[in-house]
């Protein structure tokens, strides 16, 4: 989208952001332009397969240092606000490719949080692999019969304790990067106490692991997902995260961070749609005047510009709270639900601005394409994964009204 003005640059001021975050945005935008943008449209139109995994863009973002952001000084650079930096990068990636932002969320937000609970020797071995982009990682909580509801009793993947560790049996579904991943953080029902869950790091080359065929989805085609089947897979005790029976804490702490990242991705998608719409409103003429002369669109876009500012501030606030050592369950829920709903609304109206051209993948006679049909296909999943938006609203309502009333 290099030929479209970034309205954010003249509309949005962020004087309160740390200087390091401002610099990270510049670096991320430059990296996205150089290593992702040349491949983004092909990624958005591809059919999912192991061969179509976007390794060039994946490796390029890693080489640019964006995979090191969540780890701060320990494995990357001395950042005071690593979560804020990572979410800022997610927004910039989503501006060009929402599905690559989904890949980044798994690799650089969900999995790094689970690795924070890993034994030191595992961290020393695996984190450099993740940062370099040599190895893709997966995060697996969802199953065929459970997704937003992750209570241990509903989990069908079971980790039975043995003298040397665990034996895992079960199936996980919709698992990002699984078709190419080397490792997965997997949530299991504890076979010793079925009311609790255990999170394990599993080497996907282990005997008994099978990766299913890639899911063929409406959108987010670069975020390739598939089932992972575990058939009595042996996992050493050293691979337990935090401790046996502590898996729910690990999973939920990762998901809170993931929700902020997806909220940031929603802002990136919304900003992309806004910029496309404004360009059309300025250049398309109807009834002797620019389309943007119509007050309906003036007011509509002014409202959306305000909402983008709100959505961006929400994810930034939530990320900063975590960086300062606080908890951000409510802020994360707000950021995720608000930012992703906005992305869908704004893309839909941007298509209306473009009319038939916005609905088309490309025009047969000219090859014209404005990416909006890709944005529209991609935006919907943002309201669903990392906990459906209805769940996020329930989280907010429980705090607002009280769990004694809401349940």
Image: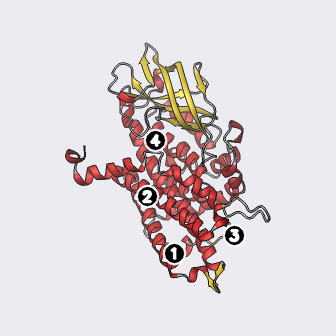
Is 383 on the left-hand or right-hand side of 43? left
Q: Residue furthest top?
A: 163
Q: Are marks 3 and 2 in contact (CB under 8 Å)?
A: no
Q: Secondary structure at mark 4?
A: helix
Q: Are marks 1 and 4 in contact (CB under 8 Å)?
A: no
The Cα–Cα distance between marks 3 and 2, rounded to whole angstroms, is 27 Å
For mark 2, what is the residue? Answer: 315
Identity of the residue drawn at 59% across and 65% down: 351
The Cα–Cα distance between marks 4 and 2, rounded to whole angstroms, is 17 Å
Mark 3 or mark 1: whose residue is earlier in sequence: 3
Mark 2 or mark 1: whose residue is earlier in sequence: 1
Is residue 271 shown to the viewer in this render?
A: yes
Q: Quadrant of residue 75?
A: top right
Residue 113: mark: 4
Tell us which disc is closer to us: 4 or 3: 3
Residue 11: mark: 1
Identity of the residue drawn at 48% across and 45% down: 385
For mark 3, what is the residue? Answer: 3
Q: Secondary structure at mark 3?
A: loop
Q: Residue furthest right?
A: 365
Q: Secondary structure at mark 1?
A: helix
Identity of the residue drawn at 33% across and 21% down: 193
Tell us which disc is closer to us: 3 or 2: 3
């Amino acid at each position: 989208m290099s030929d479209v003005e970034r309205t954010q640059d003249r509309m949005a001021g962020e004087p309160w952001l740390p200087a390091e975050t401002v610099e990270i945005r510049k670096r991320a935008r430059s990296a996205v332009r150089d290593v992702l943008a040349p491949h983004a449209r092909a990624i958005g139109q591809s059919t999912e397969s192991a061969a179509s995994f976007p390794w060039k863009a994946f490796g390029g973002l890693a080489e640019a240092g964006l995979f090191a952001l969540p780890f701060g000084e320990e494995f990357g650079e001395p950042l005071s606000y690593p979560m804020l930096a990572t979410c800022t990068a997610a927004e910039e990636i989503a501006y060009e490719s929402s599905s690559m932002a989904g890949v980044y969320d798994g690799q650089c937000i969900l999995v790094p949080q689970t690795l924070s609970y890993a034994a030191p020797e595992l961290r020393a071995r695996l984190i450099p692999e993740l940062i370099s982009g040599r190895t893709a990682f997966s995060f697996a909580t969802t199953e065929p019969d459970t997704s937003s509801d992750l209570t241990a009793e509903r989990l069908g993947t079971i980790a039975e304790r043995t003298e040397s560790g665990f034996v895992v049996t079960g199936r996980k579904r919709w698992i990002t990067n699984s078709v190419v991943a080397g490792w997965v953080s997997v949530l299991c029902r504890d076979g010793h106490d079925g009311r609790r869950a255990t999170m394990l790091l599993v080497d996907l080359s282990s005997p008994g692991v099978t990766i299913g065929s890639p899911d063929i989805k409406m959108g987010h085609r670069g975020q390739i997902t598939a089932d992972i089947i575990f058939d009595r897979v042996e996992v050493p005790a050293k691979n337990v995260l935090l401790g046996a029976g502590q898996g729910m804490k690990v999973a939920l702490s990762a998901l809170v961070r993931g929700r902020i990242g997806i909220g940031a991705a929603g802002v990136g998608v919304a900003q992309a749609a806004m910029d496309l719409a404004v360009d059309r409103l300025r250049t398309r003429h109807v009834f002797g005047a620019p389309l943007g002369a119509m007050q309906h669109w003036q007011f509509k876009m002014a409202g959306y510009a305000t909402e983008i500012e709100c959505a961006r501030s929400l994810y930034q606030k939530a990320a900063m709270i975590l960086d300062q050592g606080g908890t951000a369950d409510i802020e994360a829920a707000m950021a995720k639900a608000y930012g992703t709903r906005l992305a869908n609304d704004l893309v839909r109206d941007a298509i209306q601005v473009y009319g038939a051209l916005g609905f088309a993948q490309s025009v047969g006679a000219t090859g014209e394409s404005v990416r909006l049909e890709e944005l529209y296909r991609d935006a919907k999943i943002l309201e669903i994964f990392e906990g459906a938006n209805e769940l996020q609203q329930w989280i907010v309502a429980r705090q607002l009204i009280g769990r004694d009333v809401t349940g």
